[in-house]
Image (cartoon, rainbow, N blue to C red):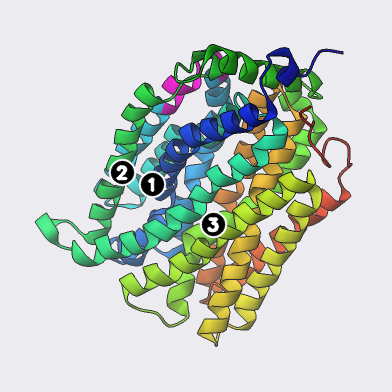
Amino acid sequence: MSKPPALSHNLSAEHIAGLYRRVAWRLIPFLFACYICAYLDRVNVGFAKLRMAEDLAFSDTVYGLGAGIFFLGYFFFEVPSNLLLHRIGARRTLARIMVLWGLISMAMALVDDVTSFYVLRFLLGVAEAGFFPGVILYLTYWFPAQRRGHVTALFVTAVAISSVIGAPLSGAIMETLNGYAGLAGWQWLFILEGLPSVAMGVATLFYLDDGPQHARWLEAPERTYLVAAVEAEQAQASHHHSLDGLRLPAVWLLSGVYFAFVSGLYGLNFWLPTIIRELGYTDLLQIGLVTALPFGVASVVMVLVARSADRRDERRWHVIIPALAGALGLFLSVFWADRPLLAIAALTMGTCGVLSAIPQTWSIATALLGGGAAAAGIAVINSVGNLSGFAGPYAIGWLKEMTGSTAGGVLLIAGFQIVGALLVLRATRRGWRSSPRET
């Protein structure tokens, strides 16, 4: 049996703990900022819809399909993008992705009919394909599984924080710049929220390292330790070959779990401003502030759930319980639709549950897969799962058009959270319950 990395390289436990803190502080804030940019560019169409749909005479079905068609481009190009990252490195791959999606997001200001709306949303998905699974894969180069749940949750909280920042910002941009220089507020929204992505893409080339072995800001023994710690864990992973990431039943089961949870994530992101408006709020800035509340609370709850999962070295129930709580919150928001404060509280509970289940699902996946299987498997799970980002918004739009309310769509995504929880509950415990421990 090989010596544990800590003993092989004469680093104390205190030094190792401090080393991982330094790595986290170096990587997570930057990747967090990148993901905020990504998420703003992906879902700001939810806010633009409040005026864009009226200006361009888009029905709710047209909007729902356009919002979701992003994920078709995302689906087809995600696995190739992640395999490319594994081959040529994260720095160039992530920079390319960010610059392209920023430019295409800005081009959304040129939309003037249904066709251009669909085409640009599809191309935005193609451009962004590989970013999220690429970062999840990138974190496996630095952190062993026992430490990865917490850092993954910190990264994924960017989903919540992007709405905390983006909802009021989007409302303010659309309200204050409407008509400036002859452009509608929703056009300024796409332009101003696309620019940071381009800037962060360029910065990625200079800031990120492809892995610990290239990190000049670390001492040589520290670089050696980080590489050895990950390699030791990879040797224990159940599957390593790229084909394992495509044919392993657990990968497809996790894809189904992720599909269920992501339906709630994007249902909320694309439709929450509209749901809030249906509760009686009319001012765009006010809608933005109320929309930010559920995501602000969720950003805290996500980290607390992740810390509990890491401390107990348990993932299964840290997925199931939040998912069921999310479903309950969404159901209650419909039941209390005529009582705005209670409905917002229920939506906050639903958002916390939906968002908290997702990082722990990734902790399960990355503990199961290593090497090429991780590159392919993570991309498969994310791409198949994100197909619900196509189906969910479209279904909500269709149901709203048929019924005149978002209630049916909210109940649909609540049901998906229950399906995801049941899939996890019935799954085999092997490889799901805990992660390989450091020694």
Tell me residue 396's x, y (percent). 55, 63
Q: Amino acid at mark 3?
A: Ser
Give the answer, above or below, for where 138 lies relative to 283.
Answer: above
Tell me residue 332's x, y (percent). 65, 77
- Residue under numbered circle 2: 194
Query: Is residue 89 magenta-colored?
Result: yes
Residue 41: give its label. 1
Tell me what residue is drawn at x 50 percent, y 70 percent. 401
SS class, disc 2: helix
Question: Residue 127 or 156: which is nearer the viewer?
Answer: 156
In contact (CB < 8 Å): disc 2 and disc 1? yes
Q: Amino acid at mark 2?
A: Gly
Residue 258: give its label. none
Tell me what residue is drawn at x 67 percent, y 36 percent. 147
- To which quarter of the image does residue 381 belong? top right
Query: Is residue 190 magenta-colored?
Result: no
Give the answer, above or below, for where 123 lies relative to 208.
Answer: below
The stretch in magenta equals: 86-94
Q: CA distance from mark 2 to mark 1?
A: 6 Å
- To which quarter of the image does residue 266 belong? bottom right
Q: CA distance from mark 3 to mark 1?
A: 19 Å
Crowd class of label 3 (few under 14; some 14 to 19; many from 20; radius 10 Å): many
